[in-house]
Image (cartoon, grey):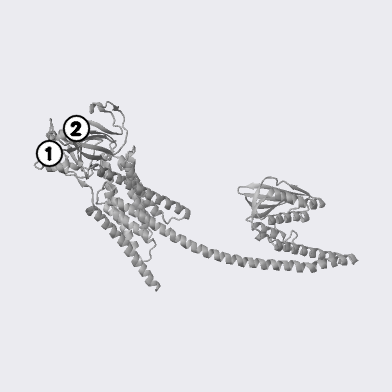
Amino acid sequence: MPLRATTMNSYLKRIISIISCAVLSAVFIIIMRFCAPAVAVAPEALGTLSNDENTAVMGRGVTAVRITDLADLQQITKVNYIPDEFVFPNSLLQNYQIVDLTKSFDFAEKGTLVFIILNLKPDSEDYREQVEALNKYKAGDYWHFTFELPKIYCASNVYLKSKLVARNGEIEDYDFINFNTSYDKRTENFKAQTAGVNLDLQFYTRRQAMDDEFAAAQVITIHYQSKGTAFSGVKNAPLIGEQSAVTGAISASQNLLIAAAILTAVVFAVFSVLSVLKHTAKFIPSIIWIFGITVMLLTRFLANGVTAFPLLWAACSLAAPFFILGGALLSAGVNVGRFPLKYLCPAVMAVGALLAFICPYIPFTAAESMRIVCTVLRAAGTVALLTFIGIETFRKNRKSDVLHTVCAAVIAVAFCASLFLPQIFPAQYNPMFWLCAITALVTFISVFILFNQTEKANAYLTANLHKEVERQVNDIKAVITERDNLLRFVSHDMKKPLVSSASLLETLIEREKDAEQVKALNIIKQNTGRVVTNLSEIGNFARFNYIAEPSQVVDLRELCASLYEFHTPDCIANGIVLKNFADKNFKVFAKKQGLENAVSNIILNAVEHSDCNCITVYARAEKNRIVLSVADNGKGISSDLDVFAPYVSENSAETNGVGLYICKNIIESMNGELTYSSERGGAVFHISLLKA
């Protein structure tokens, strides 16, 4: 297939994939919102409600629900509210404020919340039918309904009729004896704690007990206190219904939240570790949005349980969406000319996260303004993300990965929906929760595929590299073998006639009477001897092949002791004192035979050429290296002379030395370094090696 056709097919596949995922996400939200089963709202009871002191019109002066309108699982969305005072439990007032819990409301720093659930109306024409419909909730002489009260910010005392049934935290300067005769404790200081409360509501089934509607009702009275922040009172609607349905819904919600949080936390940890190990920043956007999803799920799970830090979890939960949106913007973002729009948008989301985080800690009026700002930022970020995705989708020379763009598209759809849809509790009925879980799963799959593709490519390259290295190593070995054979041939076959020539020169010198001729013959003999010596060194180098010798751990103390014993007789014969101070337990990573040859060569050079009477060998440690030094007290070395260059000797007229040149190559082949310093009073050669 032509390259252009292949590119076009890939381009169309990318467009179809991204648009399909976006459309499917939108359809999923619509189905979950309007078609999928959800928690129904318990209808508000009508009529009037009276006790011995007051009469109130239901729907205007008081709100209540009746058990005949209840099903297995419903939610109560309206509550009776009295700000700034604690009403005596099981009271009926005429001045209740009815609050719709599905909308934002400014609860006071402290106050009273009252939920009223009425029994049957005894004078109903269909009374018997209502009784039969309630038979499945009957146990003994009572109909039983479970009431699940969500978290109350930030401390609360809960009464069922006149009985204290739950305490969460401590309300400041609260005397229980004023509201409950069976509990005489007093709390003086405020202490935050939120928790859900599960109550068993019992309604007497005898008709004669229903004449007084308020007395036959179950009244839940809640005294709460916060610290004047935006998070006061109750935020979610309570659930009511059959016990297994209510507890099952709450349990399923918590289990889904913690399971999804654990999954995303594992994905976050895996991506972070792999990115560090692979030294890549390619997956940072995915890590950021997975981190945001993890925080959002985990904090909602923690906030739904018993916690002493309700505002902290609320703050983290509000800030988390900005991390998700920021990561998606960083993934799909593009720059406009020199304007760094790709990085500016995530920076704005970081500001939004900070503003959202402080919302729970400020007064309601300021928090409402801050929420508007945060909503505007989220809307702007969502529009920017949709724009970026559109550009990336239809750009032919794209740079981003298609799976990352798919994840960004799902996130964009979720944020579009979140701007218009209310938060839904429990989690299993919330399409946003499922989109978060899907995004985490798709992210994990996409990054796993990318890592897998990268590993396969690396494995292919490594296999080819190994073959190429093996071929080159074989070629190098062949060259080295050929070179060694040549060197051995040169050193052996050229040395033979020179040795014979040296013997003949000895004979000629003995027989020659002319002093000038003897002098010339001695010069020839000396030069011949140097050539023989160099050929011997070349032969040794070729024979032992020090550079090819494998490195190993070498004990310097043992090596120097062996060299001291070997060279001492030769030094004594030349009137030189050899001292060995390398007696510390130093170990180096080196080639043993090569190191022995190099040190021996340096010692012999000092014996033959330095005009010294003392040679000292010593060692010292320098960080991760060991330095072995050979010093003499002779005439030193001229600073103008490069003694490590081939065919250079101390006497500029005799440029034919190769010993130190070979030594330097040997030392450098073991990751070492050979240097020298020359001062008045001698020369010092330093061999620096890796510490083992």
Q: Nearer the viewer, residue 649 or 190?
A: 190
Tell which circle, 2 or 1, labels the residue nearer the N-terminal end. 2
What residue is shown with label 1? 121
Element marked by disc 2: loop
Asked where in the image residue 85 lies, by quadrant, the reply is: top left
Q: Residue furthest front?
A: 140
Picture coordinates of residue 202, whole percent (x, y): 20, 36
Q: Nearer the viewer, residue 429 or 595?
A: 429
The residue lying at 55 percent from left, 66 percent from top is 468
Disc 2 residue crowd, few under 14, some 14–19, many 20+, Cα 10 Å:
many
Residue 398 seen by the camera: yes
Picture coordinates of residue 13, whole percent (x, y): 34, 66
What residue is shown with label 2? 90
Disc 1 residue crowd, few under 14, some 14–19, many 20+, Cα 10 Å:
some
Q: What's the residue type where badge 1 is placed?
A: Lys
Residue 108 in the figure: left or right of residue 679? left
Residue 579 in the figure: left or right of residue 468? right
Element marked by disc 1: loop
Between the residue at mark 2 and the residue at mark 1, the CA separation in whole angstroms equals 19 Å
Q: Is residue 211 above or below residue 655?
A: above
Q: What's the residue type where badge 2 is placed?
A: Asn
The residue lying at 9 percent from left, 38 percent from top is 123
